[in-house]
Amino acid sequence: MLKQTQKRSIETRAKLLRVATEAIAANGHGALRVEEVVKNAGVAKGTFFAHFKDKDALMELIIGAQIDEYLDAAEEPGCAKNVDELVSRMRPLMDFMTRERYIFDVIVRHSGAAVKEELGPIAQTFERTIEIVAGWIAAGDFRKDVSEVLLAEGVQAFAVQAMALHFCAINNQEEMHLRFKSYLDAWLNPALAS
């Protein structure tokens, strides 16, 4: 009996995720409503909240999985050897993260955790990004006087800054990827930037 209940619970959760993903594909992340998800999944609202604390918890799973897909694509061709390649590899992910203000806001809210046990899907993608970029830095044509991990953490911080300024009316005249590139030129190759 317990196994049947667990199986049904797993199937219901998967159905909620599938229906939500379909709704997002049709109308965008910010337009998703819990009421729409439960209606299209054919479940009660209480069932939704038995599986997800709130809409943000659902969105964290979906957006985290989408970020992982972009990271898979960025990682696939091997190491980014210079700043131009690094920006090119990160650009599709950054474009996704800024496609809607709602997406960026969810990512920023869930990018860190108070304790390691609370690391959710989005926070895990931030850690994965640092690992990927640190590998590129170790193998590429970048400064070697600072640890790869510290440089990768800086790359991530500059990406977040460039994306945040993308939404700022005063600072959004420069294209996001060009601003990101200028940050990385100075951070990863300071001798060339001066």
Image (cartoon, rainbow, N blue to C red):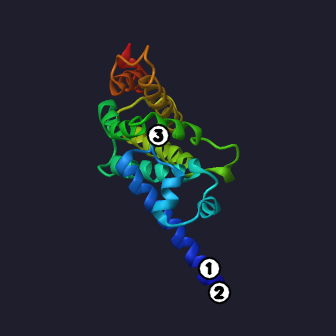
Q: CA distance from mark 3 to mark 2?
A: 40 Å
Q: Secondary structure at mark 3?
A: helix
Percent from the top left, x then y, of residue 186? 41, 20
Are the residues tagged 2 and 1 within 8 Å (C-beta)?
yes
Residue hosting label 3: 103
Left or right: residue 18 compared with residue 3: left
Q: Residues within 10 Å of mark 2 (few under 14, many from 20)?
A: few
| Quarter of the view holding residue 113 | top right
Whether residue 122 is situated above or below residue 183 in the rendered picture: below
Residue hosting label 2: 1
Percent from the top left, x then y, of residue 182? 37, 21
Q: Residue at x 34, y 30 (%)?
A: 83
Q: Residue at x 48, y 37 (%)?
A: 102
Amino acid at pointer 1: Thr
The residue lying toward the viewer, choosing from 141 and 187, is 187
Residue hosting label 1: 5
